[in-house]
Image (spheres, rainbow, N blue to C red):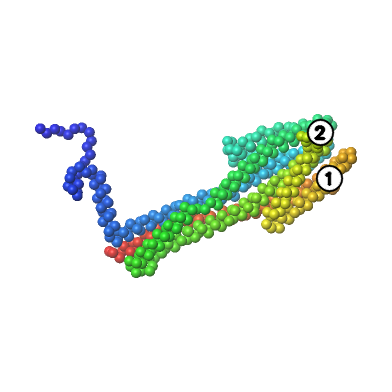
Amino acid sequence: MTHPPSGGSQTSRTPDPVSGHVGVPAQRTAWAAQARRLRAVATTEPGRLQIIGAVLALLVVAFGAVTTLEISQRASSADDVVSRSQPLSADAADIYRYLADADTTAASGFLAGAQEPEAVQEQYRKDIEEAARLLVKASGSAGSASASGREIATLNKLLPVYTGLIERARANNRQGLPLGGAYLRYANQKMAGEMLPAAERLYAAETGRLESDSADARQWPLWSIGAGIVVLGALGWMQRRTYRRTNRVLNPGLLAATAAASVVVLWLAVGHTVARAELRSAMVHGQESLDVLNDARINSLKARANENLTLVARGAVLTPDGSADQYEADYSSGMAALKAQLSKAGRLADDAGGSAPVAEAADGVTQWQVRHREARATDDRGDYDGALEQIIGTEKSTGQSFQQVDAALEKALAHEQGEFTSAAKDGRGALRGLPTGAAALAVLGAVAVIVGVNRRLSEYR
């Protein structure tokens, strides 16, 4: 008795073409037939040429794709160095400088008496406004959860507190009340103890991002170089194979593909070497000098603020052991750090444009220290008005020496900034066009491979 087939799907079976047995899946049979056809093709020279040509064309295209991707990443990092990281690092340094200069200017204006000079007030307002503007600009590039974002939030919170303390100090000073000096010292403590450290951390974070972008841009494209070597080796092997089988020295298509791959490898090696050298020069000869000069300028501003506060406090703030005036001690340590940084900046300067302003600043520091000692001696003799004139006066004062130092450092910073920007732009320019060029040459190389192989195939028809 015959039973009908049960429900559910059944895998179709066909007789095995070799054994004749039923029970081999149709899909497996199709794969086996395809494999036999490929093996049959590979046993003939035209078939082998087709397979080799396809593999070579794919290798050339893969080489172009890897090069385009890797160099695009390097070029993007180099562009970040020029257009994002370094400008943000410079802005962070300027935030620190404007805050420190505001503190110095506020102390100078306080010493001038109840009628603070208009120029001093204008300088203070400018410093505060520029610091606030740069904080807004920096906040647009730093996420609120990042290290830079947290420092920016701290500074935005503390800045109105500081300006409020300064206004109280000024109001009491105009009335001749001694409480003004206390408010000024408290404002200075807020600046020196909280705001400037936050600004310094912001500068460190942005400079770290700059160093990271520069390192990414300078990283060797090892995958691209390795792929290029493999492609050139494969093309060389194919041309040698063709020569041994046909006795023909040249195959125009394969030769064109080899030339295209060689151009990409050479362009890759030379372009990245130049970019790497220029970006390294920007960091070593530009950014390193900028770091030292920024530190020097900040120390000069802090030293000037402490010098002014020495006269404001009149010995009211002592070192922890009670042996000396705290502001005088801070001035001395700041000047020592300033001299060391100027010495280092002089060694880093690699041309007259960089070394001349540094030397001018060093001369100004020497003169400043001489005049400071004279002012301290005058104050120690009880002549406060005479010492005040030697500190903030218009002739032969420490204020004039400070202005000389600050102007020279500003000139040195501008020169080193130009050096950095020029070198970094040259590094970015060395990579420009390489991703697009590599992709185009890879396509041309793959087409040339196919043309070259097809020319050989035509000989069998």
Q: Looking at the image, can residue 107 be seen?
A: no
Q: Which residue is mark 1?
A: 373
Contact flag, marks 1 and 2 (Cβ < 8 Å): no
Residue density around tag 1, few if under 14, some if 14–19, many if 20 or more, within 10 Å? few
The percent coordinates of residue 218 (x first, y second) are: 55, 52
Cα separation between marks 1 and 2: 20 Å
| Residue 69 coordinates in the image, percent (x, y) | 47, 50
Res 352 → quadrant:
bottom right
User: Can you give x and y, in whole percent of width and height, for residue 419 in the image?
Assistant: 65, 54
Q: Residue at x 35, y 61 (%)?
A: 453
**Relative to 285, is 317 above or below?**
above
Task: Classify residue 195 by image quadrant.
Answer: top right
- The secondary structure type at the circle numbered 2 is loop
Name the one closer to the observer, 15 or 107.
15
- The tag earlier along the polypeptide, 1 or 2, is 2
Residue 74 in sight from this viewpoint: yes
- Amino acid marked by disc 1: Arg
Query: Mark 2 belongs to which amino acid?
Result: Ala
Identified at 69% across, 58% down, the residue is: 351
Measured from the top left, where is residue 286 in percent x and y? 64, 52
> Which residue is painted at 83% across and 30% down in the image?
177
- Answer with left or right where residue 27 lies relative to residue 344: left
Looking at the picture, tell me which residue is in the foreground, 161 or 133. 161
Report which residue position mark 2 lands on. Answer: 316
Q: Out of 168 and 344, give the one closest to the viewer.
A: 344
Looking at the rendering, in which quadrant would you find the N terminus?
top left
